Image (cartoon, rainbow, N blue to C red):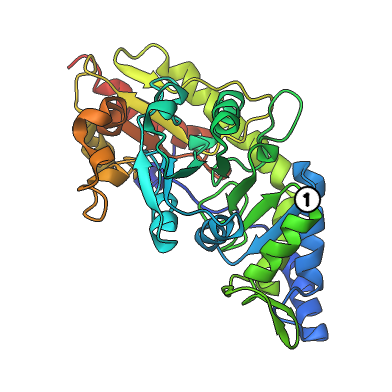
């Protein structure tokens, strides 16, 4: 490999950026029609294009995924307690606190790292109104078991699907499960609109209500029906999304090739565990997490530092657990004894770089560092 590739830093992710000249026609449309926001033509085009691509009936675009989560909880009038996972980005739990809802944390499955259905029923109380699972790393939750439990107890299910863009189960989009699914289009995601997000809803009535909530509750110029928020996506973000969508299949194909290269070469390294590919029919290869287990010669933090010394920037993702942050750690469900699997995974996980522009020799450089420290 070249000296430039040896010395250039490798980051854990990098946004896919189409050719700048391809973005200019979209900007010209915005300049010509002088519509910058408030559900303009590009916004409407992107909603329809995403419905077609993702295989969903209704989608509402948002300025970011966190606003979408907060609004989804509002849309379903969720109150009281909501069962969720400690192994996620903080926005999952923060959206509950912003709505005055008490998060109740349960442990994760040791294979999928998703909310463990076996732990759900024991956490349900008379105050429980919903379940907020996360399709962690884009790997599907056990949607059938979660839905069965929710139906038995009369609970709503909102999926944090921030990692799950384009993921399909055997016969459907993963986003069609639950009462609502929430997407993130942040710059770090497989599909991005600079900043952005969306709520997938099953009916036109639900979409209409969500669209009111994200625009201050306005129905028309003089009628406000709910205490809404300003969550609208701009025309610039929508334009970038339309451009991104043209090349998303190629981007996902490249991610899949990188995933396969990692798995083939890491398979023989004792103590390095790759998360199984999952049971999805179509994956998006959003992340590449590994576990540095006890058999590996270095601790997770030591491996993290060793990679950093080689200018390879990874993420201990998700570490710390949400329950370790001060606004959550005092909650009974955040107790260490309640979350043994999540704590173990959080102490071992590293997400390796994966993005379409990552070259094969850069992937090999990452693997070489991991392999060279094995058995020492």
Residue beneath disc 1: 203
Relative to the observer, which residue lies in front, 77 or 46? 77
Q: Which residue is at a point 71% across and 50% down the rendered structure image?
A: 201
Is residue 69 shown above or below 303? Answer: below
Is residue 350 rendered to the left or right of residue 160? left
Tell me the quadrant of the picture where the C terminus can be found: top left
Percent coordinates x, y for residue 284 in the rendering: 61, 36
Does dot 1 land on a helix, a strand or a loop?
Answer: loop
Image quarter of residue 308: top left
Percent coordinates x, y for residue 157 in the rendering: 57, 41
Q: Which residue is at a point 47% across and 33% down the rendered structure image?
A: 361
Relative to the observer, which residue lies in front, 196 or 13? 196
Tell me the quadrant of the picture where the N terminus can be found: top left
Is residue 260 shown above or below 307? Answer: above
Relative to the observer, which residue lies in front, 304 or 55? 55
Relative to the observer, which residue lies in front, 131 or 294? 131
């Amino acid at each position: 490999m070249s000296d430039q590739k040896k010395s250039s830093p490798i980051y854990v992710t990098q946004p896919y950026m189409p050719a700048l000249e391809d973005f200019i026609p979209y900007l010209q449309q915005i300049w010509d029609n002088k519509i910058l926001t408030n559900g303009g033509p590009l916004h409407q085009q992107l909603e329809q294009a995403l419905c077609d691509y993702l295989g969903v009936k209704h989608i509402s675009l948002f300025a970011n995924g966190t606003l979408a989560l907060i609004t989804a909880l509002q849309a379903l009038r969720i109150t009281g307690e909501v069962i969720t996972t400690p192994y996620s980005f903080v926005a999952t739990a923060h959206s509950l606190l912003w709505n005055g809802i008490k998060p109740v944390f349960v442990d994760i499955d040791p294979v999928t790292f998703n909310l463990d259905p076996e732990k759900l029923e024991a956490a349900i109380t008379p105050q429980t109104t919903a379940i907020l699972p996360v399709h962690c790393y884009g790997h599907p939750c056990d949607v059938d078991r979660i839905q069965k439990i929710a139906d038995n107890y009369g609970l709503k299910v909102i999926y944090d699907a921030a990692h799950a863009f384009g993921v399909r189960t055997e016969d459907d989009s993963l986003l069609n499960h639950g009462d609502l699914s929430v997407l993130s289009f942040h710059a770090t995601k497989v599909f991005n609109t600079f900043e952005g997000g969306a709520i997938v809803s099953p009916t036109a009535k639900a979409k209409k209500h969500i669209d009111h909530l994200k625009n201050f509750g306005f129905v028309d110029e003089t009628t406000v029906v709910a205490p809404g928020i300003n969550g609208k996506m701009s025309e610039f973000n929508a334009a970038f999304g339309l451009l991104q969508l043209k090349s998303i299949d190629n981007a996902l194909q490249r991610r899949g090739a990188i995933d396969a290269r990692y798995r083939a070469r890491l398979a023989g390294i004792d103590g390095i565990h790759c998360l199984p590919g999952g049971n999805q029919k179509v994956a998006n290869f959003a992340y590449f997490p590994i576990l540095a287990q006890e058999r590996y010669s270095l601790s997770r933090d030591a491996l993290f530092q060793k990679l950093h010394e080689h200018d390879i920037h990874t993420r201990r993702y998700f570490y710390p657990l949400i329950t370790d942050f001060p606004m959550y750690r005092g909650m009974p469900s955040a107790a260490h004894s309640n979350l043994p699997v999540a704590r173990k995974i959080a102490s071992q996980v590293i997400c390796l770089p994966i993005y379409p522009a990552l070259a094969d020799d850069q992937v090999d450089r990452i693997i070489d560092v991991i392999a060279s420290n094995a058995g020492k």
